[in-house]
Amino acid sequence: MKRKNIVILGSTGSIGVNALRVIERFPDKFRVVGLTAYNNHRLLEEQSRRFKPSHVAASQEGVRHLRRGIGGGNLKIWDVASGAEEIARLDCADIVVVAMQGSAALKPFLAAVRNGKTVAPANKEAIVMAGDLLMREAARHKASIVPIDSEQSAIFQCLEGRKRADVRKVYLTASGGPLLRVPKTRFDRLSVQDILRHPRWKMGKRITVDSATLINKGFEVIEAKHLFGLEVKDIEVLIHPEAIIHSMVELRDGSVLAQLGVTDMRLPIQYALTYPQRWDTGLPSVNFARLGQLAFEKPDFRKFPSLALAIEAAGEGGTLPGVLNAADEAAVEAYLKNCLKFTEIYDVVEKIVRRHRVVHDPSLDAVLAADQWARGEAAALIN
Ligand SMILES: NC(=O)c1ccc[n+]([C@@H]2O[C@H](COP(=O)([O-])OP(=O)(O)OC[C@H]3O[C@@H](n4cnc5c(N)ncnc54)[C@H](OP(=O)(O)O)[C@@H]3O)[C@@H](O)[C@H]2O)c1
């Protein structure tokens, strides 16, 4: 394989750091050409010294810091607000890893797609907001999308080489998060730190809270709908606490294909970078004998109403999933600052979703307008 030039948008986050760990193992196969961060300019500086990209971006304060520390020479330092898009469309980039958190990833994702890159999204917000648009533009510009999100990667792997018509349904597995066995009456008595202690995955704060409310699984239903052209009714969420099966596909003859593996994001990240080849990850095998058994159960929609709300939004489509995402992003931020109780996250998001007038088949402007509207509503409700 020719040496691939990689851009990582969000290199200082949990996915970004793991992507660099993967890349570091194959110095003759990958070259880092662009990195972006937001506030963590110290880590970005460290990563830049180590991986020597030609382009980096950070917040305005980060830019000032980086210019003092590593400026000069050929390194181009951008303000991330515009620089993420510029870096995503660099001529020399082969693969763009979208590991930024939140809706800020939408424009750079679109820029990568419109420039025919291979895009490896971990970020789900962009697809939730504008899945139709992104998929349409990817087809038009012959961009490939190879997902990193472990469930979407699993479905992608199970679907490889299969006809869409042969697929009967998809099982999207969920570990159940930190509240699976906690009675709902105790939810508001837990501290933010308790909620941030996910039993299986180590992730950024927003996605960890979203895994506790299970809205994250609803976002994944929306993602899978767009990435694989599925009907929402053909996607079933299944609680699987061991998180060893990352998702499954049932074919029309009743055969079920599953992708299994240890719970380490380096596995789907590496596959997105090496696709369609498979290289050694250095990760351990699943120890089936020690696991003993794998369990499954239906999600409890009454205990986790955010999941039901997200599946409803997935079915409606248009601007509604984006509104759901923006309202949730704002509510989770308020929760992390102790301005909302845990169960109030749902209350805020539900109110905003019910108030929204859905625009179907929205343009980028309509998507962004709906996002802004939802944030305004959230701010008013939270205050
Ligand atoms: N972590 C996982 O295992 C996992 C699994 C599946 C999907 N995902 C998805 O992948 C994405 C990243 O998750 P994560 O857990 O890696 O998040 P994270 O640890 O919070 O990292 C987020 C990254 O985005 C940057 N960022 C935040 N706000 C930004 C903004 N407004 N503009 C530009 N950059 C910004 C951060 O920069 P600074 O750190 O420099 O501020 C950081 O590099 C999320 O969409 C998440 O849902 C994550």
Image (tube, helix red, strand yellow):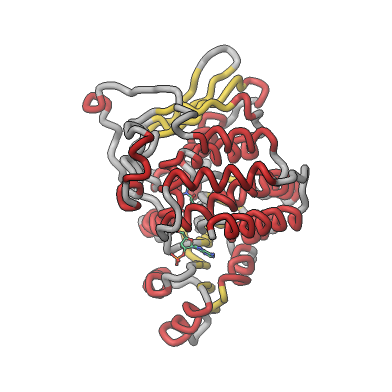
- Residue 354 higher or lower than 328, as above or below: above
Q: Nearer the viewer, residue 318 or 295?
A: 318
Is residue 112 visible in this depiction of the protein? no
Q: Is residue 225 left or right of residue 382?
A: right
- x%, y% of residue 197? 31, 47
Q: Nearer the viewer, residue 122 or 144?
A: 122
Task: Give the number of marks.
Answer: 0
Tell me residue 251's x, y (percent): 57, 19
- Nearer to me, 12 or 255: 12
Left or right, 31 with reference to 143: left
User: Is 209 drawn above or below residue 65 in the view shown?
Assistant: above
Among all residues in the image, which is located at the extreme top? 253
What is the x, y in percent for residue 45?
40, 75
Q: Quadrant of the C terminus?
A: bottom right
From where the camera sits, is residue 372 visible? yes
Figure quadrant of residue 94: bottom right
The residue that appears at 39% across and 34% down in the rendered structure is 176
Residue at the image position 68 percent from the left and 56 percent from the top:
373
- The percent coordinates of residue 218 (x first, y second) are 54, 37
Residue at horizontal 66 percent and vertical 28 percent from the top: 231
Q: Which residue appears at 52% of the width and 61% of the height? A: 9
Q: Is residue 261 above or below residue 148?
A: above
